[in-house]
Structure formats: structure tokens, C-alpha cells
Image (cartoon, rainbow, N blue to C red):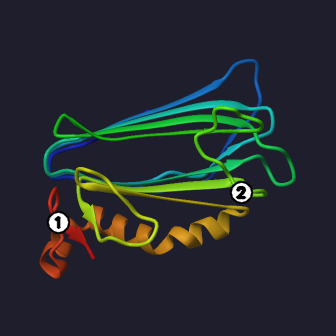
């Protein structure tokens, strides 16, 4: 799938329903390529991806932000349907800002993975990641500030509701900042590429 946001435009993508990846004869490949032009704004709130027992999923997301572009994204992985063991997932997110590397994030999850990138506590089967790209977020507990304008936060837990609640406040702030940057510039000093989301 490909998403293109034009110069100065704002696009908000909201989830409709979860995606269920079932076992099959081959690995499932999900790709998303995103381009946000100069001054463009994107809120990408992806529906949860449920990786059923026996499923093998590879997920690739590439985001290219031009100078002055801002994106907020949320992705959620649920390992296994209720009461079943998890499937396997390899997920990569690569983001650039004005042609330079901004973020390269990866997850490898599943039963007995010796190369797992995230060690989940017992019974934790939900992993959610939120990101603010192209702008700085106010420092807060659990927020990883990127070297260039951007921030990342991840939460895990046994239930989707609990993980969503853990990320609700920063997601609200970051998605509003990305979608309504003009209002926030006047109200709180938010500046794309150099400011702070308060």
C-alpha cells in the first residue's frame, strides 16, 4: 500500500477493524510506503494486527518526510488470538526526514525466537508503538527522544485495552500536534523540525 500526502496537506488515517493474519503456506508480507511532502501532516493510526498461532508475518513500513513535514503513527501487534499461542512477526520501520535517516526500528516477536528484538514479560502478548516524526516531543517517562526531531514510545501488556490506555495521553498529544500544527504553533510554541509538543 502507498500513502502520499501533498505539500501543506493534512491526512488522518483511522482504523476501521483489526487485521487478522492467519497461517498459510508462505510468510505473509505487508508493506506500506508513505511520502509526506513539504509542510504536509499525517496521522497514521493503524488498526491492530493480530498474528494468529502458526502465522508468519513480515511487515515493512517506510516513511519519507520532506523538510517541514510531521507524522504521528501508532501500530499495535497482538500475538495470537485470545487463548492461543502467538504467531511470528518481523516488523521494520524506516523513516527519513529531508533525505536523511531519522529512525530505523525493528521488532522480531514470536514463540521461542532466539533472535527476538523485544523480550516480553510472561503473559504480555500486545505490543504497541507510537511515534512522532519531524517534531520534538516534550520529555516524559518512557519516551525515547530521537537524535533528530522525533520521539518513540512503546508499551506491552496482556490486553489491548491496557496497552492502549498506557499510551493514550502521549498519543493524543502527538496525533493532535501532527494534525493541527498551525493551531498548536500559536497556542503552545510547537515548531515542526525544531519545537516541542506540550
Disc tally is 2
- Numbered circle sitting on residue 121: 2
Residue 135 coordinates in the image, percent (x, y): 23, 59
- For disc 1, the marked residue is 195
Tell me: residue 38, above or below residue 94: below
Residue under the point 61% across and 65% down: 163
**Side (left or right) of 61 relative to 181:** right
Front in this rendered view, residue 53 or 182:
53
Farthest residue, direction bottom: 187
* Image coordinates for residue 178, horizontal then vertical, percent: 28, 61
Query: Dot 1: within a 10 Å radius of its alpha carbon, few (fewer than 14), some, or many (20 or more) residues?
Result: some
| Residue 191: quadrant of the picture | bottom left
Identify the residue at horizontal 69%, vertical 32% (top origin).
114
Residue closest to the far right: 83
Secondary structure at numbered mark 1: loop
- x, y (%) of residue 141? 44, 71
Which quarter of the picture shows residue 198?
bottom left
Amino acid at each position: 500500500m502507498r500513502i502520499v500526502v501533498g505539500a501543506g496537506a493534512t491526512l488522518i488515517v483511522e482504523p476501521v477493524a483489526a487485521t487478522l493474519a492467519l497461517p498459510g503456506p508462505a510468510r505473509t508480507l505487508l508493506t506500506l510506503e508513505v511520502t509526506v511532502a513539504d509542510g504536509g501532516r499525517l496521522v497514521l493510526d493503524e488498526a491492530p494486527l493480530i498474528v494468529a498461532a502458526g502465522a508468519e508475518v513480515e511487515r515493512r513500513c517506510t516513511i519519507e518526510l520532506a523538510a517541514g513535514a510531521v507524522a504521528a503513527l501508532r501500530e499495535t501487534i497482538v500475538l495470537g488470538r485470545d487463548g492461543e499461542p502467538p504467531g511470528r512477526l518481523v516488523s521494520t520501520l524506516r523513516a527519513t526526514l529531508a533525505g536523511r535517516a531519522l529512525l530505523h526500528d525493528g521488532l522480531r516477536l514470536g514463540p521461542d525466537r532466539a533472535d527476538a528484538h523485544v523480550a516480553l514479560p510472561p503473559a504480555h502478548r500486545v505490543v504497541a508503538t507510537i511515534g512522532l516524526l519531524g517534531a520534538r516531543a516534550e520529555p516524559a517517562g518512557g519516551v525515547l527522544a530521537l537524535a533528530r526531531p522525533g520521539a518513540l514510545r512503546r508499551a506491552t501488556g496482556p490486553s489491548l485495552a491496557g496497552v492502549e490506555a498506557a499510551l493514550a495521553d502521549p498519543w493524543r498529544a502527538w496525533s493532535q500536534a501532527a494534525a493541527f500544527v498551525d493551531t498548536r504553533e500559536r497556542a503552545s510554541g510547537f515548531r515542526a523540525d525544531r519545537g516541542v509538543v506540550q
